[in-house]
Amino acid sequence: MPSLADLQERFAHYLASGRTAPLARTIPPECLDRLTIHRNNSLHAGEAALRAQYPVIARLVGDTFLAAMARRYVAELPPGSPVLATFGVHFPAWLPRQPEVRNMPWLEDIARLEWALQEAYHAADAATLDPGALGDGGVTRLAESAVPLHPSVRLLASSWPVGRIWTVNQAGWTGDVTVSLDEGGDRLVVHRTPDLHTRWQRLGAGRWTLLRTLAEGEPLGAACEAALAAETDLALGPVLTDLIRSGVLCAPATSTTERE
């Protein structure tokens, strides 16, 4: 008689593969037919989860193709948690290995953007930097402080114009749908706003370098210097103000004055 853990493992294998052989030794044949209903429900749940998390991918490849890919994905990477909000985390990296989409190399980065928006929505909260922190020499006081990014922030670099592709494939988009893959790549920051909406912004070299440097744990002063080296005419004051108001920057754990 197999243990409960062994039986559960065989059942999970059946849900993913549809092969009944591992279960046939322990479950009566008349019961195996009933499991088909459960397996179909599981596959449909996985497909629905992917469709909800990757609506642009669904629009780009079509419903029939997405359904087929979802079943393959579930078979190869079945859910490891009952929380379907986490299902699909490996989908962006899994996509390029599928032969049907090898002529769509930008699809992976669209999936990365969509998953980043999902992560931003579900990310933990944290106290953001007070907009008044920059007044009266605030930048100088914070120069030696590590100013962390909000937990919802994700930085995404792509060789493709993923922002444009994402935009023209939104439901209800009525503008020009033309996308030129030759127009170059994107550097994006994805985050959750103080009013609990998720958004992405396209970044120039200066903002990108500033956020990347802060993400590496460097102090604000070093991040500002790196940003100006990447974009010499960057207006640091307005940029920092915008990032604070957007909820991208968090309050440092300690400041220079507090350590003194």
Image (cartoon, rainbow, N blue to C red):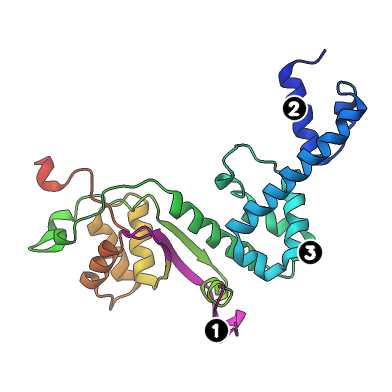
Residue stretch in magenta: 171-199
Residue of label 3: 100
Closer to the camera, 106 or 124? 124
Mark 1 crowdedness (10 Å alpha carbons): few <14, some 14-19, many ≥20? few
Residue of label 2: 9
What secondary structure is found at the residue carrying circle 2? helix
Please tell me which residue is depicted at 11% across the width and 43% down the height of the picture.
258
Q: Quadrant of the C terminus?
A: top left
Depth check, mark 3 against mark 1: the one in front is 1
Distance from disc 3 to disc 2, alpha carbons, whole Å, reads 31 Å
**Left or right: residue 57 compared with residue 63:** left
What secondary structure is found at the residue carrying circle 3? helix
Q: Is residue 86 magenta?
A: no
**Picture quadrant of residue 38:** top right
Q: Whole-percent x and y of residue 200?
A: 43, 66
Q: Whole-percent x and y of residue 90?
A: 62, 49
Q: Is residue 182 magenta?
A: yes
Q: Is residue 110 visible?
A: yes
In the image, residue 85 sits, relative to residue 13, either above or below, namely: below
**Left or right: residue 116 compared with residue 19:** left
Depth check, mark 3 against mark 2: the one in front is 2
Mark 2 crowdedness (10 Å alpha carbons): few <14, some 14-19, many ≥20? some
Q: Whole-percent x and y of residue 146?
A: 26, 50
